[in-house]
Amino acid sequence: MKLHDLKPAAGSNHKSKRVGRGHGSGKGKTSGKGMMGQNAREGSGPHRAFEGGQNEITKRMPFKRGVGFFNRYRIEYKVFNIGDLAESQLEEITPDVLVQARLVKNLKKPIKILGDGEVSRPIKITAHRFSASARQKIEAAGGTVTELGAPVIKRLPRRGRF
């Protein structure tokens, strides 16, 4: 294949319809815009958020317009309960093992272990944070808890848009 052989895919390029040139063209007189009215005019239509006179969503949800507080430094954890982890037959649980088991897609969020459920056998768990009840239950079953350091946030999250 050479440069002069390149051409767009069949049907991907359309000539634009020339409107307003007589009724024989099929797009004459009103150019496909119907009768008169706001939408037939140049610059057509109301603004994007307009809902026909009904109170707009931006006015119905004032907290989304900047009222309130958004903590840019909050650390969002990926949470696991020890009862769920104890059901798996793994002896040692680390963040990398959770990724390999496809319980976590990636390690962008730090991992926190919560104490819901029961542990009947010793498990060695490594995570970024542990709740007090989780730590107590793991150690009572003869397991060990290794807490990784505080997670480093590489980028601060931006304020969410609705």
Image (spheres, rainbow, N blue to C red):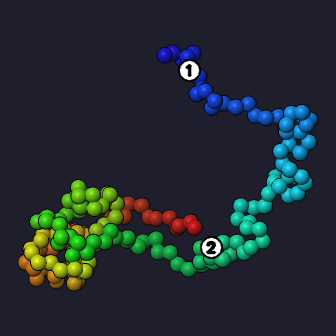
Per the image, label 2 sits on a secondary structure element best described as: helix
The first of marks 2 and 1 along the sequence is 1
Q: Residue 99's image quarter?
A: bottom left
Left or right of 22, for residue 133: left
**Contact flag, marks 2 and 1 (Cβ < 8 Å):** no
Provide residue 147's location: percent of width, then percent of height: 20, 71
Which residue is denoted by mark 2 in the rendering? 65
Residue 92 in view: no
Q: Is residue 17 above or below residue 98?
A: above
| Viewer-nearest residue: 62 or 15 | 15
Q: Is 63 placed above or below 38 here? A: below
Report whether 116 appears left or right of 26.
left
Q: Quadrant of residue 102?
A: bottom left
Q: Where's the C terminus, which quadrant?
A: bottom right
- The picture places residue 113, in percent across and down from the top left corner, at 25, 74
- Residue 73 placement: quadrant: bottom left
The residue drawn where x is 91% and y is 42% is 29
Which numbered mark, 2 or 1, is in the foreground of this view?
Answer: 1
User: Could you say which is closer to the camera, residue 9 or residue 129?
Assistant: 9
| Picture coordinates of residue 132, whole percent (x, y) | 23, 83
Mark 2, Cα crowd under 10 Å, few <14 / some 14-19 / many 20+, is: few
**Residue at the spot 56% in from the left edge and 80% down from the top edge:** 68
* Residue bearing the label numbered 1: 6
Q: Is residue 10 above or below residue 147?
A: above
Q: Amino acid at mark 2?
A: Arg
Q: Amino acid at mark 1?
A: Leu
The residue sitting at 16% across, 83% down in the picture is 136
Report the side of 58 relative to 78 (left or right): right
- Kindly state the secondary structure of the residue where label 1 is placed: loop
Circle 1 packing at 10 Å, graded few (<14), some (14-19), many (20+), is few
